Image: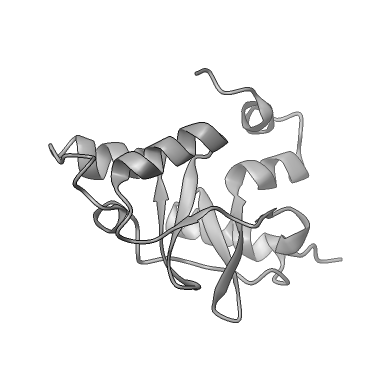
Amino acid sequence: MAQPVRSIMTSDPVTVEPQTSVTAVARIMRDQNLGAVLVTEGDRLRGLVTDRDLVVRCLAGGGDPNETTVAGACSDDLVTVGPDEDLDRAIRLMREYAVRRIPVVENGHPVGIVSLGDAAMERDSRSALGDISVARPNT
């Protein structure tokens, strides 16, 4: 029996507007212990930004994180899935596009994120990736 993405996705994803500063997004990630935030315009998905994106696309390039907006750091060529799609399809897409997270969209609106860690925990919670996914952050 197919398992829907909805069953393991993180619901109510944190979102920011494209003009939000990289510093503000980094603080949100730190304070809420997140590795990714969705970028939206109104209620429409525009992109996804990860902690790695902030470092590689902004800081490593010499950008001022107080002046640089998340629009310049986010991925905007996204692969998405619907909440009722089969989890196996989401995993295939992660593998095919070499991504660790996929936004979950319903009727054009973001409703969640499914991550490689979520899938690992669901499929084999005793795997190394499963263990890492539930470990406390080392901050």
Query: Which residue lies at the image location 50% right of the left edge and 73% below the top edge?
Result: 43
Residue 125 locus on image (x, y percent): 76, 34
Q: Identify whether 129 is placed above or below 120.
A: above
Residue 13 locus on image (x, y percent): 59, 55
Query: Which residue lies at the image location 72% right of the left edge and 67% below the top edge?
Result: 86
- Determine the image quadrant of residue 124: top right
Q: Identify whether 107 is placed above or below 16.
A: below
Residue 49 locus on image (x, y percent): 39, 51
Residue positioned most to the left: 62
Q: Where the N terminus falls, by quadrant?
A: bottom right
Q: Along the horizontal axis of the image, is 60 left or right of 29?
A: left
- Determine the image quadrant of residue 135: top right
Q: Identify whether 128 is placed above or below 1.
A: above
Q: Along the horizontal axis of the image, is 110 left or right of 58?
A: right
Colouring of the image: one colour
Residue positioned most to the right: 1
Which sits in the foreground, 112 or 117? 112
- Determine the image quadrant of residue 57: top left
Query: Which residue lies at the image location 19% right of the left edge and 46% below the top edge?
Result: 67
Residue positioned most to the top: 138
Which sits in the foreground, 86 or 32? 32
Query: Which residue lies at the image location 62% right of the left edge and 27% below the top edge?
Result: 132
Q: How many marks?
A: 0
Residue 50 locus on image (x, y percent): 41, 45
